[in-house]
Amino acid sequence: MGNEKIVVGLDIGTTKICAIVGRKNEFGKLEVLGMGKAESEGVVKGIVFNIDKTVYAIEKAIKDAGDQAGIDIGVVNVGIAGQHIRSFIQHGGITRTSKEDEITIADVERLTQDMYRMVVPPGSQIIHVMPQDYMVDYEEGIKEPVGMSGVRLEADFHIITAQTNAINNINKCVRRTGLEIDDLILEPLASSLAVLNDEEKEAGVCLIDIGGGTTDIAIFYDNIIRHTAVIPFGGNIITNDIKQGLMVLPQQAEQLKTRFGKAIAEEASPNEIVSIPGIRNRAAKEISVKNLSNIIEARMEEIIEMAHAEIISSGFENRLAGGIVITGGGAQLANLKQLVEYMTGMDTRIGYPNEHLGKSKIEAMKSPMYATAVGLVLAGFRSLDEREDRYKEAREVIAVKNAAAVKPKKPVSSKSFFNDILNKTKSLLIDDLDGKNEY
């Protein structure tokens, strides 16, 4: 593939483990080179519980993706989720030595790195430090302080932590497969790269990623991440409700949900009946689609209520002009968009990860269930905070200017050095003799 950059995203989910290999094409779009998928049996609600089963599934997904792309995979971007994720706002600041000099990128980075050293509860570890608004000499509401003059630089930071054990288990699983982790990224942040555009982030938008084990939430406003949360319910709990309520097998419950289920029971016909095979020569079982949809609606209402409560607690409920974007495997449920709009009163759309995708042989990539995996690949090319991309470009420009300014000095040989001394001595003697001849 030459020297072009290739990024691999590894989504370790509750339902599936998915690996995607991608590169940027000439138009700046993501071109998917390969995809591998395996059933996830060692992960429950986003947390690795069985390392051996998870390792096996990662190996299968990585092998399939690598074979399809025609490369050997060694480094991956990995997503992390689970109900152990915590987020909070923390204020920090530094004092600069001179108020005459402009605030530099190095000052901003020093402030951010200081936040990684803050004390967190035992058993937790900081995975992301996301700057909100900055403050320069007590002047508030500054988005980009670089270039301003001031002594005191402060900022509010959105700190995201995860359980150390959960991080260690992910690291252990990935390294047992012979891979290295380039970056560990919170899954809703990865999904946001795949399904949200800059206009929505600027106007204010809430991303709800409904996965198998968890529902992840990320709220953006003024192009900055403002709130994140993880709800410990997802599509699997709906499948479990169907299994218990209708007394069917788990596989049958999943098929009933995906093929016939509706998020609004009123949309289901009361006369529609689905016949499923009986167990061990027993008679076929008839299932009412209306009853099926009643079970699904009850659980979906609970998940949406919890997501809406997170929106309210964030304080941005009345500032989200972009409304809600639903993605993840659960977003494929029929009539879900209407249910979310009815319960929250906010404009809603389904988020497909096709905005940043170029031409691809794998059409399945355009499904909402692959939003996180696509976002993990995009994270290898883009930063979670767009200000980081601008700072990176500025650093590269400065480095080029500095390299051009420093010209290599011509080496001085010992022979030329002594010749110079000899010539200077001769000139001094001649001047001295000329001076004596004048008297």
Image (cartoon, grey):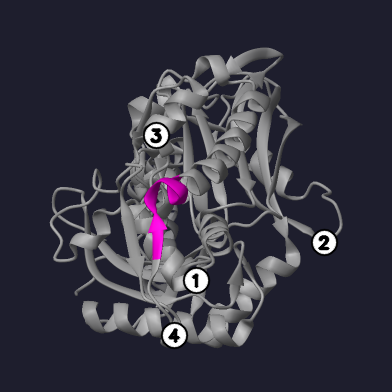
Could you tell me how far apart the alpha carbons at marks 2 and 1 are, in whole angstroms? Answer: 35 Å
- The residue segment tinted magenta is 286-293
- In the image, farthest residue toward the right: 122
| Lower sequence index among marks 2 and 1 | 2
| Lower sequence index among marks 4 and 1 | 4
Residue at label 3?
266
- Disc on res. 59: 4
Which residue does the image show at 31% across and 82% down from the upper left? 64
Residue at label 1?
250
Residue at label 2?
123
Residue 406 horizontal/vertical position (percent): 39, 50
Residue 42, compared with residue 367, is above or below; it is below
Residue 137 horizontal/vertical position (percent): 70, 15
Q: Judge by depth and name the residue closer to the eye, 277 or 167.
A: 277
Q: Quadrant of the N terminus?
A: bottom left
Main SS, magenta region, reads helix
